[in-house]
Image (cartoon, rainbow, N blue to C red):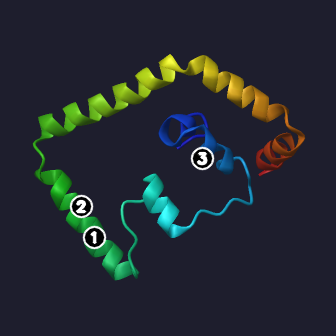
Amino acid sequence: MTPAFAPYLFGMLKTRFFLDRDFKLSIDDAVDWGLVHRVVNNVDEGLRVSLELIDKVSAIPHDAYKTIKRIMISSIINEINDRWNELLNMLAEESLKPEVKARLEEFLKR
């Protein structure tokens, strides 16, 4: 996920948290925000859960999967198109703040 899409996936308020480089997201918040599907206790359980999800996804007929994926992508694109100016204004305003500018400069050095 890129910062440009974050406002549309999480809303403006939650997205502002991502601009803070010291921001830490709890496990519960990551699940609530939809960043992770499920939290597991160890690698073996993670592998088992991943394989179960792969089995579920592979059971979906390919044409249905393609249609669902296309609908999801077009939904995000439509939302972005509808709110493009709002996004640009928010990013411009945030990038002018000294603390954000410093974080961006630090990021670009990496």
| Residue found at x 33% / y 81% | 44
On the image, the x and y values in percent for residue 93 come to 78, 29
What's the distance in space between the residues labelled 2 and 3, CA to CA?
A: 28 Å
Q: Residue beneath label 3, please?
A: 14
* SS state under label 2: helix
Query: Where on the picture, by quarter, is residue 87?
Result: top right
Residue 77 relative to residue 89: left or right: left
Which mark lies nearer to you, 1 or 3? 3
Query: Where on the picture, by quarter, is residue 56?
Result: bottom left
- Is any atom of residue 47 visible in this view? yes
Whichever of labels 1 and 3 marks the residue nearer the N terminus, that label is: 3
| Residue found at x 36% / y 27% | 75
What's the distance in space between the residues labelled 1 and 2, CA to CA?
A: 6 Å
Three-letter amino acid code at the position of disc 1: Val
Residue 83 higher or lower than 101, as above or below: above
On the image, the x and y values in percent for residue 97 come to 85, 37
What's the distance in space between the residues labelled 1 and 3, CA to CA?
A: 28 Å
- Is any atom of residue 35 visible in this view? no
| Residue found at x 81% / y 42% | 100
Residue 54 higher or lower than 72, as above or below: below
Residue 85 higher or lower than 5, as above or below: above
* SS state under label 3: helix
On the image, the x and y values in percent for residue 36 come to 42, 59
- Depth check: give the residue in front, 28 or 63: 28
Residue 53 circle label: 2
- Depth check: give the residue in front, 50 or 96: 96
Q: Counting other residues with Cα less than 10 Å from the Cα at mark 2, is it few (<14), some (14-19), or many (20 or more)?
A: few
Three-letter amino acid code at the position of disc 3: Lys
Residues at circles 1 and 3 in contact by the CB criterion of under 8 Å: no
